Image (cartoon, rainbow, N blue to C red):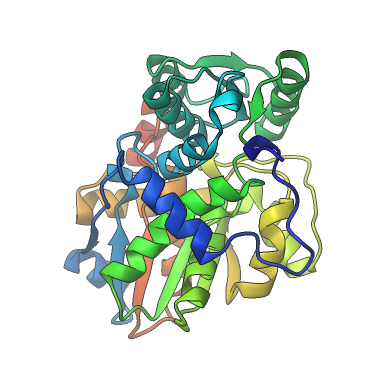
């Protein structure tokens, strides 16, 4: 069995363990430093309800996103004989940037499949790291078909952004850091695109015996996983339209859905105007640039604030890679 062809999780089982997460943490530690967990009092005041907001700054990662953890975890677990075939993935950018960073560090060829019209800055960043970028299809789900075609034609190893336990274990290292940095968390609000962040938080909390509820938030224009969670079955939607391109997925994923179904305390959606408002608020109160997916956790927290009054709540600024056109629209309040 290869790293790039991970099997489905056993029905009813969670796909990663704390052993997987600690192993990933050890492998990626040579490449990354822990990101800060900071409190911003001005942000607390803006959220209200006497909530103390603890911000995990994954937007400070070298690729501007937590997904560099995923890429390094995957690539460092890949045996040398498989690295020679190269890796391929579908991405809206951050997963691809993480893989490209890891591929450059380890001397592996990365091919990254993005939809037509993808964030041009993310595309440029992947190319700058030495990756081959293929632009084809209308959205992320179409790009997965292109990636599968390259696996068949070229023998490259598939690095799926969600359906791989090494990818998920890499994402979970951020939650392990978060719990080590703050022992008095009352809740966590996490954005969901594929679900690796949320699965990581749930797994770490359970393994450490921490009764910390995890709430998920998804963009209303790309709500397939949210809708699936509430329907209690995996659903696929025809479209995923949101400024939060990291959340723009049309289906629920095999290796993450069961854990989300089993573990989440709640799941809500926020619209693009609420995401844009959260981006502006973070810029004012934390002086941090975040992309739509990076601000969705805060947008969700603001919607959940009455339920989380007087709590210490963790959120993740998962990425900073917003393109200039979208940022201009956000700052001009055009959404």
Residue at screen point 37% across, 44% down: 28
**244 is higher (above) or lower (below) than 131:** below
Q: Position of residue 122 (x, y in %)?
A: 44, 25
Residue at screen point 23% across, 56% down: 36
**134 is higher (above) or lower (below) than 230:** above
Label tally: 0
| Side (left or right) of 50 relative to 9 | left
Q: Residue 188's image quarter? A: bottom left
Q: Residue 115 versus residue 271: which sits nearer the camera?
A: 115
Q: Residue 182 versus residue 292: which sits nearer the camera?
A: 182
Residue at screen point 27% across, 52% down: 34
Q: Position of residue 306 (x, y in %)?
A: 44, 81
Q: Residue 208 versus residue 64: which sits nearer the camera?
A: 208
| Side (left or right) of 45 relative to 191 | left
Q: Residue 130's image quarter? A: top left
| Side (left or right) of 182 relative to 268 | left
Q: Position of residue 160 (x, y in %)?
A: 63, 38
Residue at screen point 61% across, 34% down: 159
Quarter holding the N terminus is: top right
Q: Position of residue 15 (x, y in %)?
A: 65, 60
Residue 25 appearing in the image: yes
Residue 335 appearing in the image: no
């Amino acid at each position: 069995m290869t790293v790039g062809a991970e099997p489905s999780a056993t029905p009813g089982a969670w796909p990663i363990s704390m052993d997987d997460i600690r192993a990933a943490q050890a492998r990626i530690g040579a490449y990354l430093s822990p990101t800060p967990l900071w409190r911003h009092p001005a942000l607390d005041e803006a959220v209200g309800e006497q909530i103390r907001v603890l911000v995990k700054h994954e937007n400070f990662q070298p690729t501007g996103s937590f997904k560099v953890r995923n890429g390094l975890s995957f690539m460092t677990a890949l045996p040398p004989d498989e690295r020679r075939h190269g890796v391929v993935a579908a991405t809206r950018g951050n997963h691809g940037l993480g893989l490209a960073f890891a591929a450059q560090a380890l001397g592996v060829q990365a091919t990254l499949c993005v939809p037509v019209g993808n964030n041009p800055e993310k595309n440029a960043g992947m190319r700058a790291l030495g990756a081959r970028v293929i632009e084809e299809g209308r959205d992320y789900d179409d790009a997965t078909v292109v990636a599968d075609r390259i696996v068949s034609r070229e023998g490259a190893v598939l690095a799926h952004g969600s359906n791989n336990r090494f990818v998920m274990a890499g994402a979970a290292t951020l939650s392990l850091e978060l719990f080590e940095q703050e022992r008095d968390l009352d809740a966590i609000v996490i954005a969901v695109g594929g679900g690796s962040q949320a699965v990581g938080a749930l797994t770490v909390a359970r393994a450490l015996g921490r009764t910390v509820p995890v709430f998920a938030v998804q963009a209303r224009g790309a709500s397939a996983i949210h809708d699936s969670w509430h329907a209690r079955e995996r659903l696929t939607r025809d479209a995923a339209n949101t400024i939060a391109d990291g959340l723009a997925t049309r289906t629920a994923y095999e290796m993450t859905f069961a854990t989300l179904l089993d573990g989440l305390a709640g799941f809500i959606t926020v619209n693009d105007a609420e995401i844009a408002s959260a981006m502006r608020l973070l810029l004012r109160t934390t002086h941090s640039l975040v992309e739509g997916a990076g601000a969705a956790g805060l947008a969700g927290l603001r919607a959940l604030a009455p339920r989380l009054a007087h709590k210490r709540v963790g959120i993740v600024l998962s990425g900073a890679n917003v393109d200039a056109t979208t940022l201009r629209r956000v700052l001009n309040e055009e959404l």
